[in-house]
Image: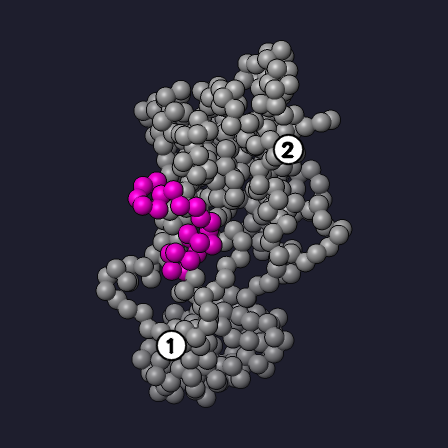
Amino acid sequence: MTATTSADPPLPFQGLKVIDCASFIAAPAAAMLLADLGADVVKIEPPDGDPHRGLYKLLGCAPDAAQADNNFVWDLNSRHKRSLVLDLKQPAGQAVLHRLAAQADVFITNLPLPARDRLGIAADTLMALNPRLVVASLTAYGETGPEATKSGFDVTAYWARAGLMDMVRADHTAPPTRPVPGMGDHPSAVTLFAAITTALYRRERTGLGGLVSTSLLANGLWSNAIQVQAQLAGVRYLTRLPRSHAPNPLSNIYQCRCGRWLSLVVLNEARQLGPLLAALGLAHLQGDARLATVDSRTTHNAAIIAAFDQGFAEHDLPTWRQKLDAAGITFGVVGTLADIDGDAQMRAAGALVPYAHREGSTVAAPIRLHGSTPRAPGPAPALGEHSTAVLAEAGYTTEEIAHLLASQVVQQQET
């Protein structure tokens, strides 16, 4: 990913005006995806700032005075945006937002449904001002139903409610698994991005915008869809057993001599079982009846896993990567955060990219539109950094802007 130049084709959303009136995390991340591809995203913030700005302090990172101001979450989810501080609790603030919405293409929010009426940002209100506007709504539990107004985060609505927290525990005796922050938010952001772009395509045909929505609950179910569909179809999963008794020894995790882990997935047993056994130093088991069929491997799973454990314990991870690659075996390294910065494949694939404005790297959007180079990641805005510029572009006079600033309806960053 490189910075665009005059020789590059225009970005797909160049000229698209987006209002990000959202917080914590999926909806703002969807706006960031649009910004990466050229959209002009105006971030609406309350006078005390989007609470998203302080999220990095709550994530359990190791205390380090030198890193106290490293707002990595805001830098990631707010890059390329412009910040407008606007007090929507005042009617004059709502009037400003309505003027912006009348000129915009997309309005994104995840504010609680009851608050949207109070703040003048309900979908019907905005679409009446601008029939071409796409209003993108993200909620925890959906737009309708007895829990539509219930608050929630990805850990509660996506991870816990949809069954993922229960399904991925180590075994049936372990407590439910705690997710890492944003684990459901960023996939849900891609869903909201897809809804927005679909609505923009429909607008090209009809001339009309409209409301699109998704929820953390729906995305959690979608992520867990195979297991959920099994339940709906009357199929019951077996109790989850410990790793040492996993039903399929050929799809399991194994520890190398160095302590690192890898995830083995052998689905084409006819072609891959022999080379795997040879790599493990277990070629003498090639004709063993316990390995012959799915049922026999399940029946004798503990003995097979124990044998594989002994084999994998013979070498460190780098050796196993070479051996398994040479044997044509599908596997994945159980990566750690410490691995990522030096991962050559992530960089070659464009999943990690350098910043445009400073040293270091960041996570790229997981979307590639070949023939169109996304913007190299730029800075996230300071609070109210662009307030007066955004108002001037919307047609406010110098005197009107001064009045809005004096009444604290709008705030501008001190320079």
Q: Which mark is residue 247?
A: 1
Does the segment drawn in magenta span residue 372? no
Q: Which residue is mark 2?
A: 383
Residue located at (28% from left, 62% from top) = 231
Residue located at (41% from left, 60% from top) = 164
Closer to the camera, 103 or 147?
147
**Residue 256 pos. (x, y %):** 58, 76
Quarter of the figure that contains the N terminus? top right
Color theme of the render: one colour
The residue mark sitting in front, 1 or 2, is: 2
Is 119 on the left or on the right of 56, as rendered?
left
Residue 238 visible within the image: yes
- Label 1: which secondary element: loop
Specify the principal SS of the magenta part.
Answer: loop
First reached walking from the N terminus: tag 1 or tag 2: 1
Task: Determine which quarter of the picture holds residue 171.
Answer: bottom left
Q: Residue furthest left?
A: 234
Seen in the picture, residue 324 relative to 16 is either above or below; the reply is below
The stretch of residues the image draws in magenta is 143-164
**Residue 355 pos. (x, y %):** 66, 42
Count residues near mark 1 (Cα–Cα under 10 Å), then give few for <14, some for 14-19, many for 20+: many
**Residue 302 pos. (x, y %):** 42, 84
Residue located at (41% from left, 42% from top) = 139
Residue located at (43% from left, 46% from top) = 151
